[in-house]
C-alpha cells in the first residue's frame, strides 16, 4: 500500500525538494508550510510518517510534535525532525518531545529516504504486533493487554502474559527452553531454563480453568509448542 507522508517545512525550496524526492519514490506526499496548514491538510489525510521542520513561523516544530503525540491518529506514527541546529541539547529536546529521528540540514535526500524507510518498516512491525490474536477460544488484544478465554476475562501474571503473547504470535512451532528465554525474557538475561517450566506450568494452569490447556503442549526432549487448529498432537 502507498505510504502517506506529511511534510511541514516553511522554506519552499527545501519543502519542494523533499516532496519531489518522496514522490519519485512513490510515496503519497502532502507538503505544507506551517502547523495551521498541516491541521487543514490532515482533515482528509492521515499520514503514515511526518517530517517536521524545527523552526516554523507560529507554532514551532517541537510544539507540533507534542501535539501529534497527544492525538490518537498520529500517536504512534514516526516523526522525523528537520533542523539547522546540531547541538546535542536540541537533539535531546527533539527526541524527548516524541520525535523518532532527527536530521540536520543540509542533508542528502538519499539519507532522508533511508531514514524514512527504516522508520516505516519499524512502524509496520509495531502495528503487526498490536493486532488482536485469536487461537480457538483464546483472544488476546496486545493493544489493551486484555485476555479473553471462552468469552471470559482471564488474568495471567506478567510473565505468563508475555509467554502466551509470544506463543500465539508463533503457533504450531516447537521452541526449546533456551529459545523461549531469549524471545520472551530477552537475550543476555541470565535465568535458569527451569524458570521457563515454572511459567509454562502457571500458564497451563490458567488455561486449564477454561479447558483449553491442551493447546500448550510439551514436546518431550525438545520444549514447548502452542498448537492451534484441529490436530491435537500430544
Ligand atoms: Ca524553517
Image: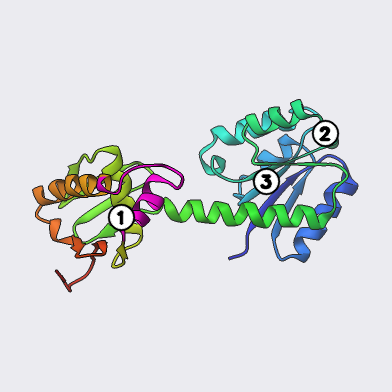
Q: What separation in Å lies between label 1 and label 2 (alpha carbons)?
A: 46 Å
Q: Quadrant of ligand 1?
A: top right
Measuring 17% from the left and 48% from the top, which residue is drawn there?
201
Residue 178 counted in the magenta span: yes
Q: Regarding mark 3 in the picture, which secondary structure is present there? A: strand
Residue 125 lies left or right of residue 93; in this view the side is: left
Magenta-tinted stretch:
176-194
| Element under disc 2 | loop
Pointer 3: what residue? Answer: 50
Which label sits in the foreground, 1 or 2?
1
For the point 66% across and 39% down, the residue is 39
Could you tell me which secondary element the residue under label 1 belongs to?
Answer: helix
- Residue 194, how many percent across, how many down? 25, 47
As rendered, which of 226 and 230 lies closer to the eye? 226
Residue, disc 2: 86
The residue beneath circle 1 is: 177
Amino acid at each position: 500500500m502507498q505510504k502517506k507522508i506529511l511534510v511541514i517545512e516553511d522554506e519552499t525550496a527545501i519543502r519542494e525538494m523533499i516532496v519531489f524526492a518522496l514522490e519519485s519514490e512513490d510515496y503519497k506526499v502532502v507538503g505544507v508550510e506551517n502547523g495551521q496548514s498541516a491541521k487543514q491538510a490532515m482533515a482528509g489525510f492521515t499520514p503514515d510518517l511526518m517530517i517536521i521542520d524545527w523552526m516554523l513561523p507560529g507554532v514551532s516544530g517541537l510544539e507540533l510534535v507534542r501535539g501529534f503525540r497527544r492525538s490518537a491518529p498520529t500517536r504512534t506514527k514516526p516523526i522525523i525532525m528537520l533542523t539547522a541546529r546540531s547541538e546535542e541539547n536540541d537533539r535531546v529536546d527533539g527526541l524527548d518531545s516524541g520525535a523518532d529521528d532527527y536530521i540536520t540540514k543540509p542533508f542528502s535526500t538519499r539519507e532522508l529516504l533511508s531514514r524514512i524507510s527504516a522508520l516505516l518498516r519499524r512502524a509496520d512491525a509495531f502495528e503487526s504486533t498490536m493486532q488482536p490474536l485469536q487461537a480457538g477460544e483464546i483472544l488476546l488484544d496486545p493493544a489493551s493487554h486484555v485476555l479473553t478465554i471462552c468469552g471470559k476475562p482471564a488474568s495471567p501474571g506478567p510473565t505468563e502474559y508475555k509467554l502466551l503473547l509470544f506463543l500465539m504470535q508463533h503457533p504450531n512451532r516447537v521452541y526449546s527452553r533456551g529459545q523461549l528465554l531469549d524471545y520472551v525474557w530477552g537475550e543476555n538475561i541470565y535465568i535458569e531454563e527451569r524458570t521457563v517450566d515454572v511459567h509454562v506450568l502457571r500458564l497451563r494452569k490458567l488455561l486449564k480453568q477454561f479447558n483449553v490447556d491442551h493447546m500448550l503442549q510439551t514436546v518431550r526432549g525438545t520444549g514447548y509448542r502452542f498448537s492451534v487448529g484441529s490436530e491435537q498432537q500430544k
